[in-house]
């Protein structure tokens, strides 16, 4: 059951962000890359037949611009395993903290950048399992110090 669920989740992620995943093939298995190519070809043919052939060429080119390509939500929480001891700054990419920081800066108060529990930087040892926002751990995932579980 777990393997089937993991496979279903991976395929859903590939399908939901197929255009974004074109740049991440170096982090996919050969089977996932083949699935992405096949799925992308089917979607492209479908869109050509139903919509794109009726659009002017100038508008068609704009669809491939980076801001038009759907990408995963970096503020989504993910399950991960720490492979090497790392320090994670939980405030990285946090929209709520940025908004409160902006409001605080308008008040001209000089408080430290800490939350109610202390510092926003926490150390996690190798072998730890976490649920964290992807934006906070993205750098460590790309460096191979943390691996995503789902």
Image (cartoon, rainbow, N blue to C red):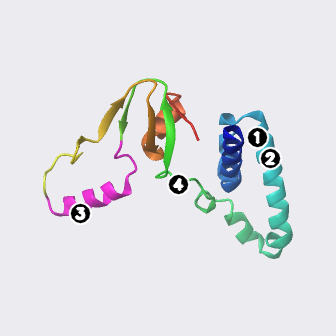
- Mark 4 Cα-neighbour bin, 10 Å: few <14, some 14–19, many ≥20: few
Q: Quadrant of the C terminus?
A: top right
Residue situated in front as seen by the camera: 97 or 62:
97
Residue 143 in the image, given as x and y percentages of width and height? 51, 30
Which mark is first along the chain, 1 or 3? 1
Asked if residue 95 lies left or right of residue 2, the reply is left
Give the labeled residue for mark 4.
73
Which mark is first along the chain, 3 or 2? 2
| C-alpha span from label 4 to label 1 | 21 Å
Give the labeled residue for mark 3.
103
* Most common secondary structure along the magenta stretch: helix
Q: Which residues are magenta?
A: 90-108
For the residues labelled 3 and 4, say whether their Cβ atoms are less than 8 Å apart. no
Give the labeled residue for mark 2.
37
The local secondary structure at tag 3 comes to helix
Q: Tell me the residue at 69%/49% (across/down).
A: 14
Q: Tell me the residue at 27%/59% (across/down).
A: 100
Q: Quadrant of the N terminus?
A: top right
Residue 117's place in the image compared with 43, above or below, is above
Give the labeled residue for mark 1.
33
């Amino acid at each position: 059951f777990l393997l089937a669920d993991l496979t279903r989740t991976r395929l859903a992620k590939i399908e939901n962000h197929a255009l974004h995943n074109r740049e991440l093939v170096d982090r996919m298995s050969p089977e996932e890359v083949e699935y992405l190519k096949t799925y992308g070809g089917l979607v492209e043919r479908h869109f050509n037949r139903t919509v794109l052939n009726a659009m002017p060429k100038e508008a068609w080119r704009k669809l491939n611009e980076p801001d038009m390509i759907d990408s995963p939500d970096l503020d989504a929480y993910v399950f991960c395993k720490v492979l090497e001891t790392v320090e994670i700054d939980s405030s990285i990419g946090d929209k709520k903290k940025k908004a409160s920081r902006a409001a605080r800066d308008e008040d001209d108060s000089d408080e430290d950048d800490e939350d109610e529990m202390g510092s926003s930087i926490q150390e996690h040892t190798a072998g730890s399992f976490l649920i964290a926002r992807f934006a906070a751990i993205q750098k460590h995932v790309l460096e191979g110090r943390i691996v995503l579980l789902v």
